[in-house]
Amino acid sequence: MPIEVILPKVDMDMETGTIETWHVKEGDQVRQGDTIFEIGTNKAVMEVEAPATGAIRNIKAETGVPIAVGTPVAWIYLDGEAAAAPAKPTAAAAPVAAAASLPPAEAPLSPAIAGPSAASGLRATPLARRIARQNGLDLKAVTGTGPRGRIGEADVQRHLEQRSRCSPAQEARPAPTPAASPSEGRLQPFSAIRRIVASRLSESMRTAPHFYLTSEIEMSAARELLRRLAARHERIGAPKPSLTVLIARVAARILRDHPVINASAEGEATRFHERIDIGIAMERDGDLVVPVLRDAAYMDMPAMSREFARLRDGMAKRTLTPAELGGGTFTISNLGMYGVDSFTAIINPPQGAILAVGRTLDKPVGREGQIVLRPMANFTLSSDHRIVDGVAAARFMAELREALENPEVLL
């Protein structure tokens, strides 16, 4: 009997999802565990694997269209099964609409909806495909070293390095495309994650009245503490602590005394969260993702450094789950490493505040009647004025300054 491929529920509050990319086309042979499509939720994009080995038939779901959880999107015919054989819905798909549960024999064959990335039939990770597209590389020229010849990021990077060493005459080049006029430029559709970010942040700016407070904080003590912690972490086998982790640690402890900064607006009420879950804004292939440090107020520096390193590595490898990318109560965005002096960040809904961190720069400041150089950094708090008043935000920033200028008091 053919095996239904349904749209899975990958998050607790997920009701619908969108197929962003098909990695197979009508009639392709797949093995159990092969990636067959990518699903986008309101939090992340995840790979979905084949539940059985066989031939993909009757692909019914188009890319970019919201689909209810549990809806059949294709069928896998096992070896020896006829493609026209009727299929009965499985128990997992019973609740879906009757129109979505038609057996494969009655479903129209439409290879065109399988999506452009499936046309090649190659096995490759989403990151490998993206890097190849960005560099005009035909994946057929790349040798995959993964399971069953799957092409990974390292395979693409290795091929690009080899290609860069070739002469122009030897280098494989993509077919030329018609040049756009200067006034038109190049139109690049949003990636799946970019669509999620655009939707959520546009909603934030529409619904949350933002206001901003900026404090200039001396980082001498924080720098010295990080230097001493680095030696301690090395002795116990913990990752080297970063400034971002130290700020997250300090902010988490302070938020216990400022619950409204850790709260969310919910209709005409304020939701005060029992836990302090701090999101750390990160960049991946030009897209914004926000992994979350859970129960951050009760982590020590070694534990937080380990968890931060795990999330950062998982973000780069695309192995984080939606649960690890959502549900934060407060967010930190640090752009200081890019030379940014200061900026205002958009609140990550439904949270009530976000902290933007600029670079640390030696500046002349007055100390005990003398002008001296001190490492200074700008911290800007964006708050939702529906639930956070100016005085509450100012008190939080004052305590943040005190803690970062004397961090050992909290650690």
Image (cartoon, rainbow, N blue to C red):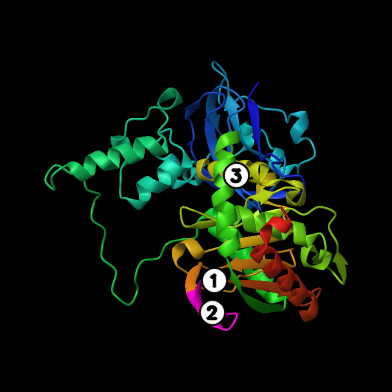
Mark 1: amino acid: Met
| Left or right of 125, for residue 379 | right
Among the 4 quarters of the image, the one containing residue 250: bottom right
- Seen at 43% across and 27% down, the residue is 146
- Magenta residues (range): 363-374
Q: Under tag 1, what secondary structure?
A: strand
Residue 366: say if magenta. Answer: yes
Marks 1 and 3 in Cβ contact (< 8 Å): no
Q: Give whichever of discs 3 and 2 has the lower sequence position.
A: 3
Residue 411 makes an appearance in the image: yes
| Left or right of 320, for residue 21 | left
Mark 2: amino acid: Val
- Seen at 54% across and 59% down, the residue is 194
Q: Give whichever of discs 1 and 2 has the lower sequence position.
A: 2
Marks 1 and 2 in Cβ contact (< 8 Å): yes
Mark 3: amino acid: Leu
Q: Residues within 10 Å of mark 3 (few under 14, many from 20)?
A: many
In this rendering, the answer to whether 268 lies above or below 85 is below
- Residue on which disc 3 sits: 311
Q: Nearer the viewer, residue 247 or 164?
A: 247
- Seen at 62% across and 24% down, the residue is 85
- Residue on which disc 1 sits: 376
